[in-house]
Image (spheres, rainbow, N blue to C red):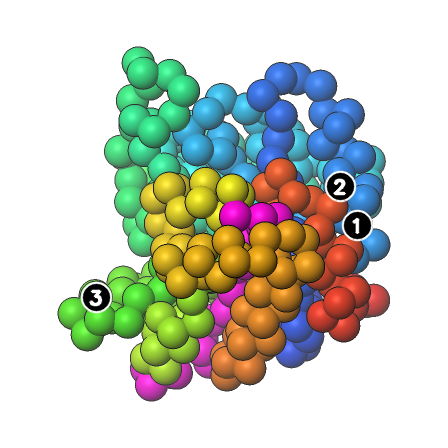
Amino acid sequence: MHRATTRLQTLLNAGEFVVSAEITPPRHHDPGKMLKVAEMLAPHVDVVQINDNLLSQARLNSMVAAHLIQQQVGVEPVLQFSLRHRNRIALQSDLLGCGALGVRNLIVLGGYPCTIGSDPHAKDASDIESTAAIAAIHDLSTQGKLFNGDVIEPAPDFFVGSIEIPCDSPEALQKSIAKLSAKIDSGARYVQVQAIFDLGPLQRWMEEVRAHGLHKRAHFIAALFPFSGAKRLEFLQKIPGLNVPDHLIARIRSNDGDAQSLQITLELLEGIRAIEGIKGLHMRCIGAEDWVPRIVEAAGLRRVLV
């Protein structure tokens, strides 16, 4: 049976530089404001990415949010699929739900631990790690095989990716590349690199990616975290996994304002686009979604029409 590719998959396979932006579901059930954000972003991006209970806070179900955006706004969603709060049964149930709703682009990630969230009684599921989950989703998508080996028909069809954090120390690089290779072997077809504030680790990490030929086996997308001013950057520095260098904060403090923030973002974007193997940009514009059109216009990016 022929299976249609997603827009994201089509663009990446065609060698287009893909542009996406992030949408955060609300902490209530009303999707109105979220849909307006999606409408604002749609003319400027190829896809939108829906985060999944961001920072371990209970939010509108991300799968439902992705479906509403796809149906009511008409822009293709990419769903962050966190393993933090899903055991194997919940994971499979949500995958079947995604299949029923036509949400086919998934990014598998562990997710921030519940300990950093707003509910002190919440506990991590810790039932399956990311490489095994990617392999299981791949088997479900290609063979209709559930995690216990049962076969279903019809099988849902997913385009699966992973999230990685770039590093540059020799020991960390070795472990990172081995883990990444295993994820690609398991079925990851694209890789989103965690938000970049310093080009050095990304450049060194991508050198190793190319040395191992991984850039020929998966598509790589780099993430940026647009920010408006020193206070925002200082807040981002406190989030686990976001390595914001002190020199960047010092620079923005010396000339705080939107123009300086935009200039730094454009410099990082220019550096990202110059790295061999990077096929797209994802903007983690949480709380700063209105910056996306400015960045797209200033950088000369364009939404690809297919």
Magenta region includes residue 212: yes
Q: Secondary structure at mark 3?
A: helix
Q: Amino acid at mark 3?
A: Ala
Of pointers 3 and 2, the one earlier in the residue sequence: 2
Mark 3 Cα-neighbour bin, 10 Å: few <14, some 14–19, many ≥20 = few
- Residue beneath the point at 37% across and 42% down: 238
Extent of the magenta region: 209-230
Alpha-carbon span between mark 2 and mark 1: 6 Å
Q: Residue lying furthest top in this view? A: 121
- Residue beneath the point at 45% across and 78% down: 215
- Residue beneath the point at 35% across and 70% down: 201
Alpha-carbon span between mark 1 and mark 3: 38 Å
Q: CB atoms at circles 2 and 1 under 8 Å apart?
A: yes
Quickly name the residue at label 2: 38
Q: Secondary structure at mark 2?
A: helix
Q: Quadrant of residue 67?
A: top right
Query: Is residue 305 rendered to the left or right of residue 23?
Result: right
Residue 144 visible here: no
